[in-house]
Structures are given as structure tokens and as C-alpha cells.
């Protein structure tokens, strides 16, 4: 039986009605068949318990997972407000799923909590062959890097992790994670996917390094204390002068997203991007992701053209990984930094991705505050990182074509 994919969207002012409308659209597209999996993305005003309860009532037997976002990526548009529902049906004999949720991240040791999340997912998944795991986490939590570390240790290096941090459209107050009938905050949920399914995955960003290389010579996980023997903020002061501290003083200053810190991963000779989320009184930089001590670092810069080129490259790599099998779904996890940098031209990026896969392929995505993805998606077993500024494209296809 072929996979059936349904996608519905609504921005009805009543979140309950919007959830009904989006779910009904998705159900029609899968020919009223029972759904095996439901993904839900909603902007902050639609992240309501009653809205998710409607989705669960319409798809009672499906695994439901998702997150709040500052923007929803669809085949025909990018929406800054509303609720979107994606369903997959006909997967029960081909694809296996395992899913779980952990709550109250801030009250727990994140590495212990992540191992518990992984244990629950693996128990639910069983002994089936794994392909990858989707993870949604509270993007405002400082424990994202440690959450990823624990998941990598539990799932193993050959089990890629992709997903993102939930967001609240730059209010920096509260984000939401969805799991079955629950709307939670300060939580993480995971979905393992395996079985007879082909996966194409690529992560790209398009940012380029500025200036000569520096060395982060004293770090503590996600805090950089010294760069080239100086206080860490001095790197930005060299480029921005007195404006450097102002750039990061207020989280609402979105310009700081345009100048992330690039950390060179020597094994692949590629940079991961790290947003600066705070500057301490001693000039130390607090990053969203971890920075290894001794790593080469740069200020990075991107533009609209480089972002679009990166999106096309990611789409081509993901398509090539399917080895000729036609994609049946393209899922996108994309940084809010790209959303703001591209502005009104953001949908041109989606159109470029569709040109690679074909205009008829359904596209479903969200803007994230922090992205989990392997750095080199063409190499089996490439380590996963918490990154920023990336576009991550996940394409799914059946093993057997018809």
C-alpha cells in the first residue's frame, strides 16, 4: 500500500476551529484512512490544549508529535500564524515508529533525562531497524546541548537525530511541545522512524567566516571565556566596537542572529553556527550549543543568495541519498535566523527546494530555535550537533517503487 500524506492548515481566529479545519483537510487527503502518524506545528496563539485535543479526537489511534514555531512552511506558502497538521497513513506495514516525552527539563539533570527519553523511545520502537529520530525540545532551555549529548550516547552514532527547538516568535517567554494529547512546556519529545523506508537528509547553512581564525582557548561546554587569550567578547568588539555588547544585550535584538559564531569541526572542515544568547559581566560568551576547548572560531555572515544556494544544495543532497527513489514527503527544519534574514523572499527558498524534488511533492516544515542535525549528512555515522542558522531537509521514500 502506498504512503498517503495529508497536510492541512488553518488560521481561523478560534484555535479550536482552526485545529478542526486543518485536521479535516489532512484527513480528506488521506482518503479518510486511519492515520499512523500526525505532526502538528502551531504558532503561539494556537498552542492550546483544546486545539491539540481536537487533533487527537480526529486521529485517535495515531502517534501525535510536534511543537510551537514562529513560522510554518507549506508547499504553497509560509505562514506566520495558524496551525498545520500533517498525517501519514498506510505506513503500518512498512514503517515502524517509537515515541516518548519527558517533562520538566529544567528540574532534571539533562543527560539523565535524555537517557530516560531514549530508553522510552527504544522500548516503544522495539527491535526494528532504525533510520533516524525526530526530536522537538524547548528552544529557550539552556539544556539543549546536554539533551543531545545524552540522546547520541543512547541511540548510537549510526542513528542520526534531526529536529529543532520550539519557539514563540521572538517573545522569549514560553514555547510548547506536543505529544499525543499533551501540550507541554520545558519538555522534549522524540519520534524514532525505521523499517522499509528510504531516508535522504542534508544540513546546510551558507554562512561564511569573517577575518582570520581565532582559538577558543578556554571554554566550559556552551560558555566561551577566552578567545586568543582575551575575553571572548573581544572577538566581536574588533568588528563592531562599542556596539558589540549592545548587539547581545537584549535578546529581542534580532540583528544578533545575523552574526553567529562559527566553530570549525576539523574532521569535516565545516563550520557549525552558534548563536550568542548572552554576554556575562566578565565578557564571556554564552552560546546556544557547546564549543570544544581549542576550537577554531570565526564571526560568520550570510546573505539571501548564500541562504538560497545552501537550500538548493541541501535539497540535492537529500534527493541523491534516496538513490533514485521518488520522494513522497519533504520535511524542513529551518532556523529562525534564516526566516528573518530572508524576510519576504523566504518562500523563494521553498520554491527552489520544490524545483529539485518536483512541484507535486508535499512540503511540511517549521522554523526552529536551534536545530539538531548531523554535520556531514553524506557520511554514515557523522556526529550530530546542536546548530543554528541551518536548513535541514528530510526526504522520505518507500524502498519499493510502484
Image (tube, rainbow, N blue to C red):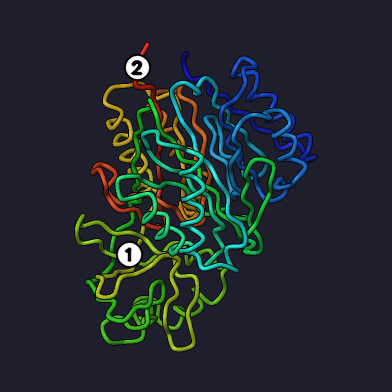
Mark 1 and 2 residues: CB-CB less than 8 Å, in contact? no
- Marks 1 and 2, how far apart in space? 41 Å
Crowding at dot 2, Cα within 10 Å, few <14 / some 14-19 / many 20+, comes out as: few
Residue 297, by quadrant, is bottom left
Residue depicted at 71% across the width and 28% down the height: 58
Disc number lying in front (1 or 2): 2
Q: Name the foreground residue: 343 vs 23.
A: 23
Q: Can you give x and y, in whole percent of width and height, for residue 301 in the image?
A: 35, 61
Q: Earlier in the sequence, mark 1 or mark 2?
A: 1
Residue depicted at 57% across the width and 73% down the height: 250
Residue 393, by quadrant, is top left
Task: Identify residue for label 2.
Answer: 400
Q: Residue 97 vs residue 177: left or right?
A: left
Badge 2 element: loop
Q: Name the foreground residue: 212 vs 219.
A: 219
Q: Residue 278 vs residue 273: left or right?
A: right
Residue 264, by quadrant, is bottom left
Residue depicted at 36% across the width and 60% down the height: 273
Badge 1 element: strand
Q: Can you give x and y, in whole percent of width and height, for residue 66 in the image?
A: 58, 43
Vertical side of 337 occupied by 275: above or below: below
Task: Identify residue for label 1.
Answer: 262
Amino acid at each position: 500500500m502506498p504512503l498517503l500524506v495529508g497536510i492541512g492548515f488553518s488560521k481561523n481566529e478560534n484555535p479550536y476551529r482552526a485545529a478542526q479545519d486543518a485536521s479535516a483537510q489532512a484527513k480528506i487527503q488521506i482518503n479518510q484512512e486511519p492515520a499512523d502518524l500526525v505532526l502538528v506545528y502551531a504558532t503561539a496563539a494556537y498552542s492550546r490544549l483544546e486545539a491539540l485535543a481536537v487533533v487527537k479526537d480526529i486521529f485517535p489511534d495515531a502517534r501525535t508529535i510536534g511543537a510551537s514555531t514562529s513560522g510554518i512552511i507549506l508547499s504553497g506558502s509560509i505562514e506566520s500564524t495558524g496551525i498545520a497538521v500533517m498525517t501519514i497513513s498506510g505506513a503500518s506495514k512498512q514503517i515502524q515508529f517509537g515515541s516518548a516525552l519527558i517533562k520538566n527539563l529544567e528540574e532534571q539533570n539533562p543527560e539523565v533525562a535524555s537517557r530516560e527519553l531514549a530508553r522510552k523511545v527504544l522500548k516503544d520502537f522495539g527491535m526494528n531497524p532504525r533510520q533516524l529520530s525526530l526530536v522537538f525540545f524547548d528552544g529557550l532551555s539552556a539544556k539543549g546541548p546536554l539533551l543531545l549529548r545524552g540522546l547520541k550516547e543512547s541511540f548510537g552514532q549510526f542513528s542520526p537525530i534531526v529536529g529543532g527547538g520550539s519557539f514563540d516568535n521572538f517573545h522569549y517567554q514560553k514555547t510548547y511541545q506536543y505529544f499525543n494529547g499533551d501540550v507541554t512546556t520545558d519538555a522534549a519529545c522524540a519520534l524514532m522512524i525505521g523499517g522499509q523506508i528510504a531516508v535522504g537528509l542534508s544540513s546546510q547553512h551558507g554562512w561564511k567566516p569573517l577575518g582570520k581564525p581565532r582559538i577558543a582557548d578556554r571554554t566550559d561546554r556552551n560558555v566561551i571565556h577566552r578567545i586568543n587569550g582575551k575575553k571572548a567578547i573581544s572577538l566581536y568588539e574588533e568588528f563592531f566596537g562599542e556596539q558589540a555588547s549592545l548587539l547581545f544585550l537584549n535578546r529581542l535584538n534580532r540583528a544578533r542572529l545575523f552574526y553567529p559564531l562559527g566553530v570549525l569541526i576539523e574532521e569535516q572542515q565545516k563550520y557549525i553556527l552558534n548563536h550568542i544568547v548572552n554576554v556575562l559581566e566578565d565578557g564571556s560568551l554564552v552560546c546556544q550549543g557547546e564549543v570544544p576547548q581549542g576550537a577554531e572560531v570565526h564571526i560568520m555572515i550570510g546573505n539571501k543568495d548564500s541562504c538560497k544556494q545552501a537550500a538548493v544544495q541541501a535539497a540535492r543532497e537529500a534527493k541523491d541519498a534516496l538513490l533514485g527513489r521518488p520522494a513522497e514527503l519533504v520535511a524542513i527544519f529551518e532556523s529562525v535566523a534564516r526566516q528573518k534574514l530572508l524576510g519576504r523572499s523566504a518562500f523563494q527558498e521553498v520554491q527552489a527546494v520544490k524545483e529539485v524534488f518536483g512541484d507535486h511533492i508535499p512540503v511540511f516544515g517549521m522554523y526552529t530555535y536551534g536545530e539538531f542535525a548531523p554535520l556531514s549528512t553524506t557520511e554514515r555515522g557523522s556526529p550530530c550537533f546542536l546548530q543554528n542558522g541551518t536548513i535541514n531537509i528530510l526526504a522520505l521514500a518507500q524502498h519499493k517503487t510502484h
